[in-house]
Structures are given as structure tokens and as C-alpha cells.
Image: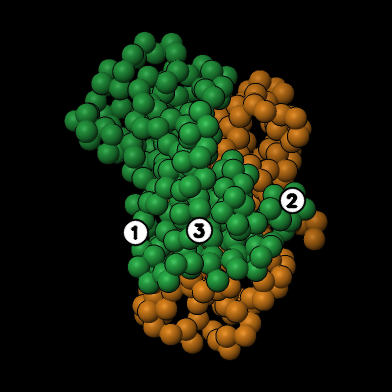
Chain colours: A orange, B green
């Protein structure tokens, strides 16, 4: 029995579609009336755990799920011991530094030393500003980070940008990109080593599907 | 201008009601169509910041909000430098240790040493198990902690229990209480010291309202 950790939210629909192409049908989780957090696949060979984004690498690292789908942003932030197996290509967004449009800052190096930067992704932000050798004070927020520069709690933010609409609506502008993030298939390293083919066949089916979708461009 | 940080979610309605009785009307935030995160009061004397639970103490500690309403559970977990001004009495829930009903554990001390305990509140959990002198491995999850014992990632959980329905629905039972949590009015210490009466008048009006509601029992 393979257990797959799926992130609730923006990645869910595409994740379910990709597993369906590999023969594991978890479409029940897309039903808005579904309240179950542990859902068997149609074929009975597997089950899905519906968890929050940040919990996918936790379930996979502890081996409670052998596979999982989660954004690269979360993987980079949480630094859990999971194997990155495939870049699934969907869920694309940029991790970016953003400031008030009126601030006049054109790149991250323009920010004043020791200024405050708000983020949900303080590990990623710390690594980035350390790389610039620019000391900043990080303020960890758990949501609505775009309020940071508006309220004055921070001069800049580090956050995910998909369409850029939230930034525009709040008078903010992205001035530098840390990295581009997409959904990744991850696996529990020990389960992969001990696998007799069951997990690898799913991974390979998802890889083939990936090659196919790329070649169709 | 007083800025008040309000937590989205379960505490919002009661928080708005309590501020209304103190003369600050933020009822706009209760409109389901409201998309604004920064909302002026009807009288124009104050504004509300609509933020996530865990961010209320951050905005108050940094002085971006002079007052805030947040659960005691969040205050205890985040340990930010804010002044606790009033116990507002609503939003009551217990922070509890829960296990599978079938596990046979009757109290926290029954748990095996070095077992895993899943929680969103790992600071509170660490303090509690240290107090018992019981070494446990804490697994930080960000949501649906009740999945912990079901998936086997943890033997027990530490989580908030309001009605107990989520526990029952998942075959879990609370075996020990860490503390009882209610909504608290918190303030930015420096703003309170420098206040010429504007903030204190709001706090006193909310305190009087509290005394009144208690005397009505």
C-alpha cells in the first residue's frame, strides 16, 4: 500500500491529475463535499493523505507517506530529509523581494542595512540576504505578508508571487527574484531504497507523463 | 489614531463586538464581501488590521498595532513581548494531550519515553513534557494534527480542543489538559507607557464591559 501526501490548496487539482495518469485515482479529494483527510485510491493500491503544504515534507520525511507533492518553495524553506524525484512543472511562482512602489528601491542591495524584512519564508530570506552580505532583521509572519510595508512593520517582504495581482493591489512591486518554484514529487529515501518496484513504477509513470507533456510543446 | 490587530477566524465576531461596546466600530470586517485587511473604524479614531492568529502578537510587539485580541494559546506559544491587559472570556478552549482511544493511555505520564508527539504548539508541548520530565520527540505540524496518531507519525498530539468533535470523529480522546485558553486583550508596552489616555480609555471601557457581563451571571 503506497501512501501519498497531497497538499491542500492550489496544487491539489494538478497533483490528482498527475497521479491519475500514473494509475492512482484520488479524484474523490477534489469533491468539495469531501471531509476525509485519508482517502483510498479507486484501485485500492494506495491512499492519499490530505495535509497542509508545509506538512507534506514532514509526512514524507518520517516515512508515513512514501511519496508526496509539494512546492519547491516549501521544500527549500523546511529543509526536511526527502528525496526530490521529479519537477512536475505546474504551480509555477516566483519567490521575490518586494517593496512599496513609492520606495524607490530598484534591487535588494538598495535596501538599508538592518532594515526589517517580513516573510513567511524566513529560512529562504535569511539565506538570500546572507548571500548579499546585507544584514536585515527578519520578521516572521504567517499570512498576508503584503501588509508588512503598508503598516510599516517592514521595509520589504520576501514572498511568493504568482500573477503579481496581490502586490499591485497593495502598491507593491517585486524588485528581485530569489528562485522560481514549481511542484515537486518527493519520496521517503528509505522507502525508495527498500522498494520492490511498486513505488518506482508510479514515479516512472509520472516521469513518462512528464516527458510526454513536454514533448507536446 | 489607535491601530488594533484582530485575528481572522473564530475570535473575530466577539472581538468586534467588544470593541463596539468600547466605542470603536469595526463591524465592516464581518461583512463576508470585505476584502480589505486594514479597515478604519466608523468614528475615524482607529483602524483595524485583519491578520492571522499568530501574527497578532507580532504586530503588537513591534508597535504597529497598539492593541490586539488573540487567544492565550497563541500568546503562550509565540512568547512575544506584549502586555496582557484583559481576559476577554470568549473563545474558550483547552490545550490538551490526546491519544487514540484504543491506545489505553490514561494520562500523559503513561506515554512511552521518546515517543513522538505531533503539535502545532511545540513550545507549549515542550514545556509541558519537560515539566513531566518525560522525554518526547516533537513533530511540528501546521494543520490537521488529529491525523498524527491515525497515520502513525505520532503516538499522541497536543492540540486545542473546543467541542471535542474533531477528536471523537477521529477516534481520539483527550487524556490531560495543559491549560485553558481564552481571548486576551494585549497591548504594546511602550505605547501604553507613552499613552495620553486614548488607549487606556478603550482598555477601561472594555474592562467595564467585562465586569458588567460577569455581574450579569
Dot 2: element: loop
Location of residue A56 in the rendering, given as x and y in whole percent from the top left corner: 52, 42
Mark 3 vs mark 1, CA separation in Å = 21 Å
Q: Which residue is mark 1?
A: B81
Q: Nearer the viewer, mark 3 or mark 1?
A: 3
Mark 1 vs mark 2, CA separation in Å = 32 Å
Q: Is residue B127 left or right of residue A170?
A: left
Residue drawn at 75 percent across, 49 percent down: B32
Location of residue A97 in the rendering, given as x and y in whole percent from the top left corner: 55, 73
User: Which is nearer the N-term, disc 3 or disc 2?
Assistant: 2
Frontmost residue, A199 versus B122? B122
Pinpoint the chain carrying mark 1: B
Pinpoint the chain carrying mark 2: B
Q: Which residue is mark 2?
A: B31
Mark 3 vs mark 2, CA separation in Å = 23 Å
Using the rendered image, report if marks 3 and 1 lie on a common chain: yes
- Residue A124 vertical position relative to residue B209 in the rendered view, above or below: below
User: Which is nearer the N-term, disc 1 or disc 2?
Assistant: 2
Q: Quadrant of residue B120?
A: top left
Q: Nearer the viewer, mark 3 or mark 2?
A: 3
Using the rendered image, report if marks 3 and 2 lie on a common chain: yes
Frontmost residue, B40 versus B107? B40
Q: Which residue is mark 3?
A: B202
Circle 1 residues within 10 Å: few <14, some 14–19, many ≥20: some
Dot 1: element: loop
Dot 3: element: helix
Location of residue A182 in the rendering, given as x and y in whole percent from the top left corner: 62, 57
Frontmost residue, A187 versus A9? A9
Q: Are marks 1 and 2 in contact (CB under 8 Å)?
A: no
Q: Is residue B51 left or right of residue A117?
A: right
Amino acid at each position: 500500500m503506497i501512501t501519498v501526501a497531497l497538499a491542500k490548496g492550489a496544487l491539489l487539482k494538478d497533483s490528482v491529475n498527475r497521479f491519475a495518469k500514473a494509475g492512482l485515482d484520488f479524484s474523490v479529494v477534489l469533491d468539495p463535499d469531501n471531509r476525509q483527510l485519508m482517502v483510498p485510491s479507486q484501485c485500492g493500491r494506495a491512499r492519499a493523505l490530505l495535509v497542509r503544504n508545509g506538512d507534506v515534507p514532514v509526512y514524507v520525511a518520517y516515512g508515513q507517506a512514501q511519496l508526496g507533492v509539494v512546492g519547491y518553495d516549501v521544500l527549500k524553506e523546511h529543509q526536511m530529509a526527502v528525496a526530490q524525484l521529479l519537477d512536475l512543472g505546474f504551480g509555477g511562482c516566483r519567490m521575490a523581494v518586494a517593496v512599496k512602489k513609492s520606495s524607490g528601491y530598484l534591487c535588494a542591495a538598495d535596501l538599508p542595512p538592518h532594515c526589517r524584512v517580513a516573510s513567511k519564508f524566513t529560512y529562504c530570506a535569511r539565506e538570500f540576504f546572507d548571500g548579499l552580505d546585507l544584514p536585515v532583521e527578519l520578521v516572521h509572519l504567517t499570512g498576508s505578508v503584503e501588509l508588512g510595508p503598508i503598516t510599516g512593520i517592514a521595509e520589504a517582504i520576501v514572498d511568493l508571487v504568482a500573477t503579481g495581482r496581490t502586490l499591485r493591489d497593495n502598491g507593491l512591486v517585486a524588485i528581485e527574484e530569489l528562485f522560481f518554484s514549481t511542484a515537486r514529487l518527493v519520496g521517503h529515501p528509505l522507502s525508495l531504497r527498500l522498494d520492490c518496484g511498486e513505488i518506482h513504477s508510479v514515479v516512472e509513470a509520472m516521469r513518462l507523463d512528464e516527458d510526454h507533456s513536454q514533448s507536446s510543446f
